Amino acid sequence: MNPANDASPSFAMITCAHGAELAVKQSIAAEGWRLAFSRPGFVTAKHDSSRVLPTGIFARTSSWSIGQARSQDGSEQIQKLIESLEGSDHAGRPFDQLHVWSKDRAAIGRFGFEPGIDEVAGLVSEQVFAALSDKWVRCDAANRIAEPGESVLDVVLVEPSHWFFGTHTATTWPTRWPGAVQPINPADPPVSRAYYKAAEAITWSGFDMQPGDLAVEIGSAPGGACGRLLELGMRVIGVDPAEMDPRIDEHPNFRHIQARGGDLPRREFRGAKWMLVDSNVKPDQTLVTVGNIVTNRQSDFRGLLITLKLGDYDASESISRWKAKVESWKPESVVIRQLARNKCEVCFAVAMPG
């Protein structure tokens, strides 16, 4: 149950990218959480005194656990959910939102897998909503975006026959999205999945990007992220030795510089307010390139969204060192997260003084 006014141990359930469980476990263990049940993409833990949900770079969602159900019969699982709710401190207090999703069944990109509300979760969400809508939830359908401060009932399908139930309060953007995956439906098929990564990073960062602003993307080919920036009405410079997709290259607000970011004179970045970086380059080299640009006296960047490739999750040990390097640029703030759309990589949102 939500332990806000309870002296009993706190139980939490966390979802993450398939493969990131050890990084999550190490992070929450340092906060005194003791590990319990886990599966790829899903971790549960117990704490004797914490009244704050465990978080961290690799924790995609975090909820207070109130129960679980195992059955091949969905109606039995729903009944168990109702029993868990009746025994929780939410009895008599309906939730504002209902979020139902499946844990990641594979590493992102493997066999074409992408996180989100899959077909099974969609069907289950309809069944759960129908059973709870009269008494337990106020929303008009499952998997709506929550407003800040709203209470959310979470149902995670660890397997179709094994559900976990939990609760959380919506605050930041990821906690407002079902399963922390941004719901977005572009009008036209994006050039690449980098479109979704950029959309998520822009919203999560809170950067005040405005139509007409000049943005630079280093590692821009074939143009997925540039497509999102252009969609938002910005002027965009794409820096990459490779060719851009014609849909991007021919846009009137786009300019392609066919080079590597570190090879360009600093005047090419003059007037740019935003930088996105997503290159297939080792993190240390990426940070050298970006650091040389943003510490130049002519730099006027207000925000940086830097994707660093881990290669494998053992490299997460280097994140603190990379953060120290970024902090040497004298930013206003640095926030790090493995976005829901990130593969084995992390995103640094860096706000620069302006």
Image (tube, grey):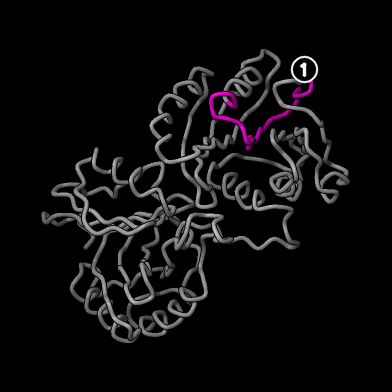
Residue type highlighted by circle 1? Pro
Crowd around label 1: few <14 · some 14–19 · many ≥20 (10 Å): few
Total tally of numbered discs in the picture: 1
Which of the two residues, 267 or 88, is positioned nearer the viewer here?
267
Q: Position of residue 258 (x, y in %)?
A: 81, 31
Q: Position of residue 293 (x, y in %)?
A: 66, 20
Quadrant, the N terminus: bottom left
Q: Position of residue 334 (x, y in %)?
A: 48, 31
Work out whether 345 lies above or below 177: above
Work out whether 103 lies above or below 72: above
Q: Is residue 294 magenta?
A: no
Residue located at (35% from left, 49% from top):
21
Residue 211 quadrant: top right
Which of the two residues, 184 or 135, is positioned nearer the viewer here?
184
Q: Is residue 187 visible?
A: yes
Residue under numbered circle 1? 265
Residue located at (54% from left, 31% from top):
350
Quadrant, the C terminus: top right
Identify the magenta region: 264-286
Residue found at the very far left of the displayed protein? 7
Which of the two residues, 21 or 256, is positioned nearer the viewer here?
21
Q: Secondary structure at mark 1?
A: loop
Residue 244 quadrant: top right
Q: Is residue 278 magenta?
A: yes
Work out whether 222 lies above or below 354: below
Q: Position of residue 66 (x, y in %)?
A: 24, 66
**Residue 269 as seen in the image, left or right of residue 67:** right
Q: Is residue 155 visible?
A: no
**Residue 120 as seen in the image, left or right of residue 307:** left
Residue located at (70% from left, 21% from top):
262
**Residue 206 as seen in the image, left or right of residue 81:** right
